[in-house]
Amino acid sequence: MIDRSRISWLYDGDGVLTAALIPIDEWRRYEASLSPKESDAESPADAMEEFGRFMASWDYRYDYDPAVACPVCSAATKDWRDDPERPFTLKTASLGGTLLFRCNRCEATVRHKYFRYNFETDAFPASN
Ligand SMILES: [Zn+2]
């Protein structure tokens, strides 16, 4: 929440309130509390469909673990599918056994590769 006592109210020449000015440190605290933009954090529908097919054809010798962790910035979730913070966005899923996630904190790509008896994960920092 923004500390209302620190807001400067701006009025036009007729005395009509037109804007609110907040100190940058207040804004930064507030901004950090906002959820990531839905359009950025939402997994594309086709990726979710692919994921559905991936899960439907699951025949690996272990249960699917929906935890994702980013080794670049250490963001982590126990379940990327229903974490309200949406730390990871599924970008692509392939029936061959590869899931690619984007870390929404540092934009690294986190890859999960599934094999019959184990899975491996690695990551690539965002390229600038
Ligand atoms: Zn990260």
Image (cartoon, helix red, strand yellow):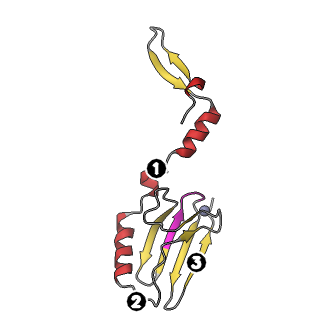
* Quadrant of the drawing holding the N terminus: top right
Q: From the viewer's perspective, is residue 64 above or below residue 37? A: below
Type of the residue with mark 3:
Thr
For the point 55% across and 33% down, the residue is 2
Q: Which residue is mark 2?
A: 59
Q: Is mark 2 within 8 Å of ligand 1?
A: no
Type of the residue with mark 1:
Lys
Q: Which residue is mark 3?
A: 121
For the point 51% across and 45% down, the residue is 34
For the point 54% across and 45% down, the residue is 33
Identify the element where label 1 is drawn.
loop
Tell me which segment is drawn in magenta. 100-106
Q: Are marks 2 and 1 in contact (CB under 8 Å)?
A: no
Q: From the viewer's perspective, is residue 44 above or below residue 15? A: below
x, y (%) of residue 118? 54, 87
Q: Earlier in the sequence, mark 2 or mark 1?
A: 1
Identify the element where label 3 is drawn.
strand
Q: Are marks 3 and 2 in contact (CB under 8 Å)?
A: no
x, y (%) of residue 92? 44, 71
Q: Earlier in the sequence, mark 1 or mark 3?
A: 1
Q: Is residue 103 magenta?
A: yes
Q: Earlier in the sequence, mark 3 or mark 2?
A: 2
Q: Is residue 53 magenta?
A: no
Q: Residues within 10 Å of mark 1 (few under 14, many from 20)?
A: few
* Quadrant of the drawing holding the C terminus: bottom right
Q: Which residue is mark 1?
A: 37
